[in-house]
Image (spheres, grey):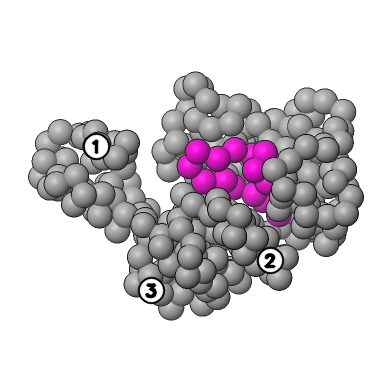
Amino acid sequence: MKKKLEVKNLNQPLYRKEGRRHLTGDVTMKTQKLEISGIPALLYGKESRKVYLYVHGKMGCKEEALPFAELACPAGYQVLAVDLPEHGERKGSSEKLLPWVAVPELEAVYSYAAERWKNVSLRATSIGAWFSMLALQAKPLRSTLLLSPVVDMEDLITNMMQWANVSEAQLKEAGEISTDFDETLSWQYLCWVREHSYRWKVPTQVLYGAKDNLTSRAVLEQFKQRTGAHLTIMVEGEHWFHTELQLAVLQEWERAHI
């Protein structure tokens, strides 16, 4: 029997007036705070039959969805954003940012959305994109927008092993090895990645920075060939889009493809 989703509406609708960049003339954004199977979530926008699931990247949080919502909601969508494990309201919680934790959670969030909206789309960033593609690869998504996506986690991990001068044999023997670039290499994680591939067939737009230090252009081109995704490349873009120019390009890309 399917586990029933537990959903809490934690308060009456809020109307947000704060945010890091307001993109519409009306900066008032209807926002509802929810909990979906224990996962903190925010729902932006007025009632609609269409929704974007917003999945942040590492060091992000659900509140980062506001600038995207300011574009998507006037276009007729709502935006449902969640906190991944160890992020946002979940910092210090027992759940860890691991694929065998995050992927089932995103499956539950999708089930919640599919029961309430006719059309479900995805907007995801970095490792959040990888988690989302694993979780939603068989789901009938309407469209997908991916920013700086991690598309080949095995390639990323083996690159990190080279940066740390760690061999497979050493990692297997140790189980976990800390690095000086603030990442912990894990044999269990690498094995899980090798055992869980994904096939992505959803219509997809990708925004990629040519200076991305985590995903190479060659790896992204392979993803494009496998999936039919459409690429937009910002020459001055990095993995983290954060400068004024990068955010402006991100805004125009989102506006063009919502």
Q: Position of residue 112 (x, y in %)?
A: 70, 43
Name the quadrant of the N terminus: top right
Instruction: Name the image quarter holding residue 170.
Output: top left
Q: Position of residue 15 (x, y in %)?
A: 86, 36
Measure how far apart labels 2 and 1 are at the Cα level: 37 Å
Residue 166 visible in the shown view: yes
Task: Identify the amino acid type marked 2.
Answer: Glu
Q: Which residue is mark 3?
A: 222
Decide: is 109 above or below 93: below
Instruction: Name the N-terminal-most of marks 1 and 3.
Output: 1
55 magenta-colored: yes
Q: Which residue is mark 1?
A: 179
* Residue positioned 16% across, 40% down in the render: 171
Range covered by the magenta-colored residues: 52-65
Residue 90 bears which disc, if any? none
Residue 252 bears which disc, if any? 2
Instruction: Name the N-terminal-most of marks 2 and 3.
Output: 3
* Residue positioned 53% across, 32% down in the render: 87
Task: State left or right for residue 112 relative to residue 244.
Answer: right
Instruction: Name the N-terminal-most of marks 2 and 1.
Output: 1
Measure how far apart labels 1 and 3 are at the Cα level: 28 Å
The answer to which of 36 and 16 lies nearer the viewer is 16
* Residue positioned 14% across, 45% down in the render: 166
* Residue positioned 10% across, 45% down in the render: 169
Answer few, some or many: residues within 10 Å of disc 1's Cα (few below 14, many 20 plus, some between 14 and 19): some
